[in-house]
Amino acid sequence: MPRYNPATIEPEWQAYWDKNRTFAAPRLPKEGAEKFYALDMFPYPSGDGLHVGHPEGYTATDIVCRAKRMQGVSVVHPMGFDAFGLPAEEHAIKTGEHPRVQTEKNIATFRRQLKSLGFSYDWDREIATTDVDYVRWTQWIFLKLYDTWFDKEQQRGRPIAELTIPDDVKALGVDFARQWVDERRLAYQSSAPVNWCPALGTVLANEEVIDGKSERGSHPVERRPLRQWMLRITEYADRLSSGLKKLDWPEGVKALQRNWIGRSTGAEVDFKLAPGDSPGAKSDSPGAKSEFPEKPADGVLRVFTTRPDTLFGATYMVIAPEHPYVERLTTPEQAAAVKKYVEAASFKSDLDRTELAKDKTGVFTGSYAINPVSGEPIPVWIADYVLISYGTGAIMAVPAHDERDFEFAEKFGIEIKAVVDPGDKVSAEERAKVLAGKRVSPEAGVAINSGEFDGLPTAEFKKKITAWLAERGVGAEAVNYKLRDWLFSRQRFWGEPFPLAHELDDDGKPTGHIVPVPEADLPVDLPHLDDFKPPGEPVPPLEKAPEEWLYPVIDGVKCKRETNTMPQWAGSCWYYLRFLDPKNQDTPIDPEVEKAWMPVDLYIGGAEHAVLHLLYSRFWHMVLHDRGVVASPEPFQKLVNQGMILGENNEKMSKSRGNVVNPDDVVREYGADSLRLYEMFMGPLPDSKPWNMDGVSGVYNFLGRAWRLVVDERSDELVLNQAVTADEPTGEQLRVLHATIKAVTEDLDKLSFNTAIARMMEFVNFFTKESARPRACLEPFVLLLSPFAPHLGEELWRLLGHGDTLAYERWPAFDEKHLKQDTIELPVQIKGKVRAKITVAADADQAAVLAAAKADPKVAELIAGKEMIKEIVVPGRLVNLVTKG
Ligand code: ANZ
């Protein structure tokens, strides 16, 4: 009758843990104990509920946490919800129901599901990014980003005219001073292109645009410039890159982050525009010594190049279609073609424009610029393979040595002039082609066709030419990052409002001044809307907010609130901090608490967050660190990416394929312990693995065997199996137990859960065959099993006579001495014939083995009175005694 029945055991233990707050972590780590902060990437509470991919990483951290608690470590293991986002807003647009209502329903489902899986979260710490109290501190942090310079320079609260800023800036007046200060803020406004879909009447996120069309309905999407908020993450590019060194993260993720940041070194070079549009006019080479100005002078095109050594081979220039000089450089004859080209480019995303394989397109402006080293005029083109957002938005094109330029020059018949001889880096045939301008060669080599610099190796030439340009004030060393400032505003309703407003003049027009909402007035909550439909223009839905929300008076100043909202990334940038001090009303996190618990010791989540989330949150953390809010320099010390769980046929699980496994169904049929154990047994945590229901039933059977090891299934009562004894374990039983403890403990340290489970299976197989199963072996085993199958663990522990939860029982220790086989049996030969068998300690030395052999009664009888000629002991194998006669 008392069969293993997770459906009754599991809810009981879940209720017990809840009621007793078994996993509540203290405010500060226990004194004298090691601390451990385990973090899961918190889920977005979608309407579909939990997916089997979620419990994979969640089970892994949970196992580690449960084992650590038993090892005396002070553990904090929180959970919450990343709850802003599009689907709730779309639901609101369709039904008119406030996104908060939908979000709360979804959170309730997720919470129920997570609890049904027996995770040892400290639920007292639960937060959702949409909680008004959480939003308050997200806004508070935004203000820190906005005001950084003021705080750093201790200028807060001073009027512009009294700021300590350079005199030459001050001399230019208040507006200029304000601009100077704004340039030092980490949050600033800028016009950036958005994906505007006229048919849907809404702005779309990049993920919602596929090949220039809306994901929904496949309508054309335009890129329209819009005033936006940006975060100056580029200021932290270097630290974001160098800080990776010290982190225990997968190398692949580090490489992705480094590539994303993409540090490039080279030079900026100024090209003077040719006077008029005549290609004949040769200008003077730069002569007089001068400084390279911070911004290019009027009538100068500045480029960024990683190969200043190829300057003599620059046969044309390209500016991005968005470059401010487009109009100025376009001659009347070219105007129509340029207009058409620029418009077409506005429909393309950066990705569409830069993919190497794409056919190069472009249009000539009709104007020329002067190559600063040769003094030759070269044509200026507009082409969309040059991005406005990188470097200076303009390039010198060197078709002989750059692949994109080569393709472009071939297509448009532009001169290709080799200036680097690749030497023997390529075949003789190839080299001849390069030198003749018939092949592109990006390799380094030796300078040719470069005047006085001929013969210099590339690296040396780079340094020399950069110095040469700098001396003449037309160039300087420069570093560029692929990383761009973070476009931080969205034209959405369901996000955090910015804690900012725009000052209005008496006529109700914006003066251009920004008024931060005072800290004491935070949070700025979202207003009530009757209609969530997008406004039909590329403006935020909050433009339709009620007047009393939209037009506040702040410090006596009439304002209009900022109507953009923050992106979903904002909330996930700092949730790990709030988890540590979720109820604090005075600050986002008490510094004492932060210091004691941070950094996160183990962060597990999907590889899809390898770049953005981890970069954004590190950026915020560094800013908070610089502002003294947190002491830790980095948030996540160790990161592990779980692999993807695929459908049975090795395909991605998706609704359209109909192969999604619902964890609720698995729990109903097999129980949470089986789901947990199965997901850990599927294979190594970082690997992708296909789902297989037979596998679930396999681990379910294993748990049933573990149950029967302890419980008498044939009895009507829930009683112990009669094989469970108080006996001393045999040597072999001890050996199996200690080998299991050792393997499981070490595998846990390596997060190698599947192998740990395999060892526990061996244990169960062995003890199932033992007719006497000493408690001294079963109890430690139950403790070992409990992090993996916590409900079963608790239940067996109780049946073995313990009143309380095992959550804080001491983790079993292993003793090396039991790992060896205690005794061995050896044959004893006399003159080559086996006469007896002796049992000796496995590690007995030769003398002891020999003594034991001679002491055997039979042997003693046979050798009595005989002369010994030879005594041979082959350790571990045999003893051979050779006697005379
Ligand atoms: C001349 C040249 C010659 C270049 C040569 C390369 C090879 P990374 O490594 O990505 O930093 N570039 C600069 N700004 C650009 C922009 N906004 N859009 C597209 N391309 C741009 O590469 C920098 C190189 O990419 C620069 O060096 C420039 O081309 C191009 F044999 O200048 B190079």
Image (tube, rainbow, N blue to C red):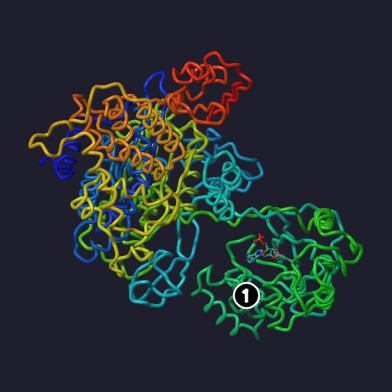
Q: Which residue is mark 1?
A: 383
Q: What x and y, as percent, mark residue 393?
A: 63, 65
Dividing the image into four equal quarters, which quarter contains ligand 1? bottom right
Looking at numbered disc 1 in the image, what kind of residue is underneath it?
A: Ala
Left or right: 711 as drawn, with respect to 202: left
Is 185 in front, or is 483?
483
Is 22 in front, or is 711?
711
Quarter of the picture containing the N terminus is top left
Note whether residue 125 is visible.
no
Q: Residue furthest top?
A: 865
Left or right: 249 as drawn, with respect to 73: right
Q: Is mark 1 within 8 Å of ligand 1?
A: no
Left or right: 803 as drawn, with respect to 394: left
Q: What x and y, as percent, mark residue 523?
A: 31, 42
- Residue at horizontal 70 percent and vertical 73 percent from the top: 405
- Residue at horizontal 59 percent and vertical 85 percent from the top: 336
- Residue at horizontal 65 percent and vertical 73 percent from the top: 328
Q: What x and y, as percent, mark residue 392?
A: 65, 61
Q: What x and y, as percent, mark residue 46?
A: 28, 56
Q: Tell me if mark 1 has few (under 14), some (14-19) or many (20+) residues whose alpha carbon lies within 10 angstroms of its own.
A: many
Q: Under tag 1, what secondary structure?
A: loop
Q: In the rendered image of this protein, does residue 526 appear above or below residue 165?
A: below
